[in-house]
Amino acid sequence: MQIELPISKSIANRWLMLQAIHGDELMPVSDSMPDDVRIMSEAIGLLGERREARIDLGNCGTAMRFLTAYCAQLEGQTTILDGVERMHHRPIGQLVEALREIGADIEYLGEEGFPPLRIKGCTLDKHRIVTINNPQSTQFVSALLLIGANIHTDSTSPYIILTHEMIKQWGDAAEYTSPLIGGVGGGLIEKDWSSAAFWYEYVALHGGEITLPGLFRSSIQGDKVVADIFANLGVQTHYSTDGVVISSSPLHPTPYTLHHDFVACPDLYPAVALTCERLGIELHATGVESLPLKESDRLRAVAEHRTDADHRMAMALLIAGYEVDDTACISKSYPQFLEHYRQLKESN
C-alpha cells in the first residue's frame, strides 16, 4: 500500500518564519496540513493585522518558541502568547533570557520561566553574541537563528542544522517559493520522516510492505535515522528517487537488547519503545532528558500506555494495539493518520 505522509512541519514552520521575517507572502496552508503549521500561519496573519494581539497557540511548542523571538523584534507590536495548560509547564526561560540580553521586553504572566508571555516588540541588538549551552529545546537556538541573532551554542542537533540549511537556501535562492530539503525537483516540501516512524512500527509488528513517497536518503531531517533504528527491528528500507519502500525482514533472535541515543531524535521514542515492548526486545535508551517536556511526559506516557493528549503517543499506542482515549490530538502533526490506518488494516 502507498501512504502519502504529511509534509514535514519542521521544514514548513521554519519556512513560514523566514517568509514572515523577510516580509514575503506566506505559502498557502490547507486544512490537510498538520495543525501546527496552520496555527503558525494563522498566528503570523494575526500579527500582520493587529498592533496588539493575544494569540492562543494550543499545544504547539514550535510556534511558542519561534513566535517569541519573532514578536520580540516587531517594533510597536504588543503580543500575548498563550496556550493550553500543558504549555504552561513547557519551559521557555533560556530563550527569554537570551532575547532579553539583546534588548527584548518580555514579561511572564504566570510562573517565571514558562508561558504565557507578554512581548513588547522593540529594536534588538542582533550583533551582540548570546550563548545557550545545553538548551532544553533546540528550538530556542533555531528561534534566535531565524531572526538573525548572533547565537552561540554547544548543541549540534540535526534540527539546528536544518535551520542553518534553510536560512542558507533562502539566501542562495531568492526564487524559491517553498523549500525542498534533500529531494529533487518541483520545489515541494518533503514529507515527514517523524510521521514515517509509525509505519515502520506497523511493519515491525504486523509485517507487510508500505510505499512512502517524498522521503529521501539525503534529507537533513534528523528523524531519517528511523530507517537505521528499525533495521534492527525487522524492517528494511529501499530508497528510490521518489521515496522509500519499507518491508519486513528477518529479525535477530529475541530476546536481545537495542541501544540507542535519542538526544537528536526524541520524537521517535514512542514508536521505537512500544515496538521493542511488543517484540520482547529490551531497549536501553539514552538522551531522553527532553522527553518529559514534550506535549506529554513521554517517558511516563510510554511506560503507562497513556495518550495524555499527545499526538505521537496516540499514534504509537494505536499501532501497538492499545486502546486510545483521544485521537483528536493526532491532527497536530498527521491529520490523515486515522484514515490511512483504517485503509492499511482493510488492505491486509
Image: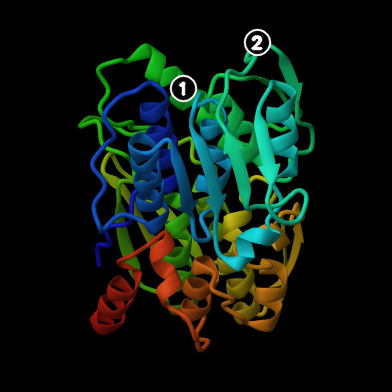
* Residue 149: quarter of image: top right
Name the front one of labels 2 and 1.
2
Check disc 2 and report the residue beneath it: 127
Q: Is residue 330 above or below residue 117?
A: below
First in residue order: circle 2 vs circle 1: 2
Considering depth in this image, is 341 or 336 the residue closer to the camera? 336
> Residue 136 vs residue 212: left or right?
right
| Spot occupied by residue 204 in the image (x, y as percentages of width and height) | 49, 71
Q: Amino acid at mark 2?
A: His
> Residue 134 vs residue 141: left or right?
right
> Residue 267 vs residue 186: left or right?
right
Tell me if I can see residue 70 in this picture: yes
Which colour assignment does the render follow? rainbow
> Residue 342 vs residue 133: left or right?
left
| Mark count | 2
Residue at position x 66%, y 27% from top?
Answer: 104
Q: Is residue 276 above or below residue 264?
A: below
